[in-house]
Image: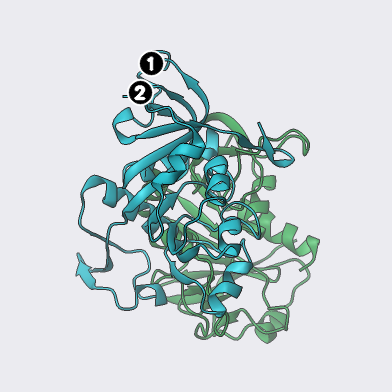
Chain colours: A cyan, B green
């Protein structure tokens, strides 16, 4: 099975109304090339599950400006001031989640778990409308799994089977998101032959990955640049 | 808040850290605490997926893919490790992080903290604040004593939305250090040059005064 694909080709997997998971903590570990290609794709009504919505006019912030995003699920949108503007104008739904709950819900989504109880957010506004249960004398909130149609993730290296290794704090949500979507596209800086990665160093085993593309845009000291 | 006040607070918070402890620093003043700690004596955890955070040695020499939770560049200490966000928050919620140092909008006399949302404004971010409160073994709040409007941030009851039902353990401001003991807020230390009268004047919360109150100098 040929998993190595062209960005222009594989991006067409995404359809209007899809739920997408997009890796990254801000721009660090975000699949910048796939996001850039998505800005040229004629889709709308997307639900984006990502920690942030990029920055104003950067990364996922471009998709927001283009009006392609219907709903954003994440933990910290403060870094893009335009998110509040779109929300106030009724152009964007927001589901704010504690970061640990968001990551655990993605893990649950990928692991076939139907829900779990966490102490996080119990007694706060973010627990409103959720089932609360006392377990061993403490209050826990029922959280449901998150799943997506397509996950766009970033890794440092892939072999042609789709085994992935990550780089420093660019790992973040990526290894969780690969497990929780129907179709997973991994953007990587380097593609190597099968056997070149040590089995011990592989973080994401290949069964989670459907397509591999090589990055064209990368994050450098000066910002997002062409590779 | 002045640089001197920030330095005073972060130095005092640094003195709380036991050797070999796992410490998570929030955004703002908490981040400055690292400057006053030998990073080979404690292990700094950052929720975006690393233990062994070390300060940058030079401002020009940084890796854009190596950042802390405030998205500021950091460096890799000896013995550092990386992990995904799920594992990182399992460490936090699971009680494996010894100390979290967090900023606050308000802390009340019960020890409840509000540090993520302002009433009447859009709530756009929560990050890892609620998770850290629910799981860190000890929570230290570092904050200026009063808001920019001059209102006390140490209040009788939080009027801003609380972050957790879990109560904090210690509050460090530029004026004083309070600890919570037996459900009461207790004034433990006065910062250099600060009088008890000033602390009483700028604190809305009711507090007890420790028998062994220390005046720092």
- Location of residue B42 in the rendering, given as x and y in whole percent from the top left corner: 55, 40
Query: Which one is in front, A69 or A53?
Result: A69
Q: Residue at x 20, y 57 (%)?
A: A114
Residue A55 occupies which quadrant of the picture?
bottom right
Query: Which image quarter holds the N terminus of chain B?
Result: bottom right
| A118 horizontally vs A31: left or right | left
User: In the depicted view, which residue is nearer to us: B9 or A148?
Assistant: A148
Residue B26 visible in the picture: no
Crowding at dot 1, Cα within 10 Å, few <14 / some 14-19 / many 20+, comes out as few
Q: Is residue A188 above or below residue B97?
A: above
* Circle on res. A161: 2
Residue that mark 1 sits on: A194
Give B52 or A18, whichever is nearer the viewer. A18
Q: Quadrant of residue A77?
A: bottom right
Q: Residue A139 appears at what percent x and percent y? A: 27, 70
Q: Are marks 1 and 2 in contact (CB under 8 Å)?
A: yes
Q: Residue at x 51, y 39 (%)?
A: A8
For numbered disc 1, what is the local secondary structure?
Answer: loop
Assign the C terminus of chain B to one quadrant of the image: bottom right
Compute the Cα span from label 1 to label 2.
6 Å
First of labels 1, 2 by sequence position: 2
Dot 2: few (<14), some (14–19), or many (≥20) neighbours within 10 Å? many
């Amino acid at each position: 099975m040929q998993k190595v694909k062209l960005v222009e080709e594989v991006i067409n997997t995404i359809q209007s109304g899809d739920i997408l998971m997009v890796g990254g903590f801000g721009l660090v570990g975000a699949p910048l090339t796939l996001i850039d290609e998505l800005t040229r794709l004629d889709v709308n009504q997307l639900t984006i599950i990502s920690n942030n919505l990029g920055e104003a006019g950067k990364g996922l912030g471009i998709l927001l400006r283009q009006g392609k995003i219907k709903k954003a699920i994440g933990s910290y949108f403060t870094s893009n001031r335009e998110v509040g503007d779109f929300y106030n104008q009724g152009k964007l739904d927001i589901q704010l989640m504690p970061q640990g709950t968001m990551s655990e819900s993605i893990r649950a989504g990928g692991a076939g778990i139907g829900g779990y109880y966490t102490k996080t957010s119990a007694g706060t506004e973010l627990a409103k409308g959720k089932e609360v249960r006392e377990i061993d004398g403490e209050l826990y909130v029922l959280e449901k799994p998150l799943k997506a149609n397509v996950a766009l993730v970033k890794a440092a290296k892939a072999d042609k089977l789709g085994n992935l290794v990550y780089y420093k704090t660019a790992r973040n949500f990526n290894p969780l998101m690969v497990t929780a979507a129907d179709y997973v596209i991994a953007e990587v800086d380097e593609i190597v032959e099968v056997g070149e990665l040590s089995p011990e160093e592989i973080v994401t085993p290949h069964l989670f990955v459907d397509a591999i593309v090589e990055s064209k845009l990368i994050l450098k000291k000066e910002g997002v640049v062409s590779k | 808040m002045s640089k001197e006040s920030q330095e005073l607070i972060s130095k005092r918070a640094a003195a709380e850290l036991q050797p070999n402890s796992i410490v998570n620093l929030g955004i703002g003043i908490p981040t400055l605490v690292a400057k006053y700690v030998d990073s080979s004596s404690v292990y700094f955890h950052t929720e975006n997926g690393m233990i062994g955070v070390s300060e940058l040695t030079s401002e020009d020499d940084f890796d854009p893919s190596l950042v802390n939770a405030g998205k500021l560049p950091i460096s890799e200490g000896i013995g550092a490790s990386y992990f995904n966000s799920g594992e990182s928050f399992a460490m936090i919620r699971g009680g494996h992080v010894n100390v979290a140092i967090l900023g606050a909008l308000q802390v009340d006399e019960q020890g409840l903290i509000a540090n993520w949302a302002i009433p009447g404004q859009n709530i756009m971010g929560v990050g890892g604040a609620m998770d850290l409160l629910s799981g860190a073994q000890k929570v230290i709040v570092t904050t200026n004593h009063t808001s920019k409007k001059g209102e006390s941030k140490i209040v009788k009851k939080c009027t801003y939305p609380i972050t957790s039902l879990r109560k904090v353990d210690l509050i460090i401001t530029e004026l004083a250090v309070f600890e919570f003991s037996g459900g009461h807020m207790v004034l433990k230390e006065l910062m250099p040059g600060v009088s008890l009268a000033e602390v009483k004047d700028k604190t809305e919360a009711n507090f007890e005064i420790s028998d062994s109150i220390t005046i720092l100098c």
